[in-house]
Image (spheres, rainbow, N blue to C red):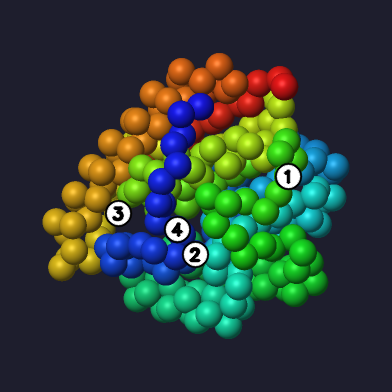
Amino acid sequence: MALHEGKPQTLEVRQPIRWEQTSAKSFEDISRYIELPKDVSGLSFLDIGAGGSDFTATLLERGANAFAIDPLYKSRSDLKGKMKNFFELSRKRKLNFLPRQERAFERFYESIKTNPDHYKAAQAENLPFPDNYFDYVISITAITQYLDSNKDTLFAAVKEAIRVTKPHGLIQIFPFQDEYISAVSPISPYREAYDTLYEVRQKNQRALLKVLEDNQAVTINVSPTYEGSKLEILKAAA
């Protein structure tokens, strides 16, 4: 897989174009975008760029061996501050997902206190896990809609996701190659920069797709979801 080395930007480096600092997507909302088995007990999961989501907390409660990574986990106080800003902005914009995300963050925060080893302060391009470790890897608005503004970073993150996934394991990345992002209203002073970044991101996603299509170690599929599309990467047998 020709996902080359470079000097990728990390999750902590972002353009001042999108108003979110982070988010706390609920398990309920994430389940609309990704495929999950009904019984997760004994299975291993990784959420890349999880923020304050309760996805990992819910899976742990259901008997899964679940982990989340996000560079923001290195400081819980900073994460709480960013979430406070996010909730305030969401409240001003009267976004209907706010109550779900506030509840999700409460559950997340209890979980990170009681299960700290399952929340890693790490970058998507350098995952602190061994090869062939996870049955399922997901990334919701992190690898894409975030890291994909830099081609090297995008390729490095996907390469790492494939590395830590077990043979026959499934990677799901949302959103992918759709108009979902362009429908989000940016802060008006950044409109031109936002539109330019969107085009760059889409170009990088197309380049990634071409590389994956030529890689015999994976099978890929772009499929519709509740809103937009996702990239599915099924890792072949060893």
- The amino acid type, in three-letter code, at marker 4 is Thr
Q: Name the residue under label 4.
A: 10
* Tag 1 and tag 3, C-beta contact below 8 Å: no
Residue 151: percent from the left, percent from the top? 36, 42
Q: Mark 1 points at which residue?
A: 130
Residue 92: percent from the left, percent from the top? 35, 76
Element class at badge 3: loop
Distance (Cα) linking label 4 and label 1 = 20 Å
- The amino acid type, in three-letter code, at marker 2 is Ser
Sequence-earlier tag: 3 or 2: 2
- The amino acid type, in three-letter code, at marker 3 is Val
Distance (Cα) linking label 1 and label 3 = 37 Å
Q: Is 134 on the left-hand or right-hand side of 192?
A: right
Element class at badge 1: loop
Q: Quadrant of residue 176?
A: top left
Tag of residue 23: 2
Q: Residue at x 18, y 57 (%)?
A: 193
Viewer-nearest of discs 1 and 2: 1
Q: Mark 3 points at which residue?
A: 184
Q: Is 147 on the left-hand or right-hand side of 130?
A: left
Q: Residue at x 74, y 51 (%)?
A: 66
* Tag 4 and tag 1, C-beta contact below 8 Å: no
Viewer-nearest of discs 4 and 2: 4
Sequence-earlier tag: 4 or 1: 4
Q: For the residue carrying disc 4, how many other residues have a C-alpha within 10 Å: few (<14), some (14-19), or many (20+)?
A: some
Residue 78: percent from the left, percent from the top? 53, 80
Distance (Cα) linking label 3 and label 4 = 23 Å
Q: Is 62 on the left-hand or right-hand side of 33?
A: right
Viewer-nearest of discs 3 and 4: 4
Q: For the residue carrying disc 3, how many other residues have a C-alpha within 10 Å: few (<14), some (14-19), or many (20+)?
A: few
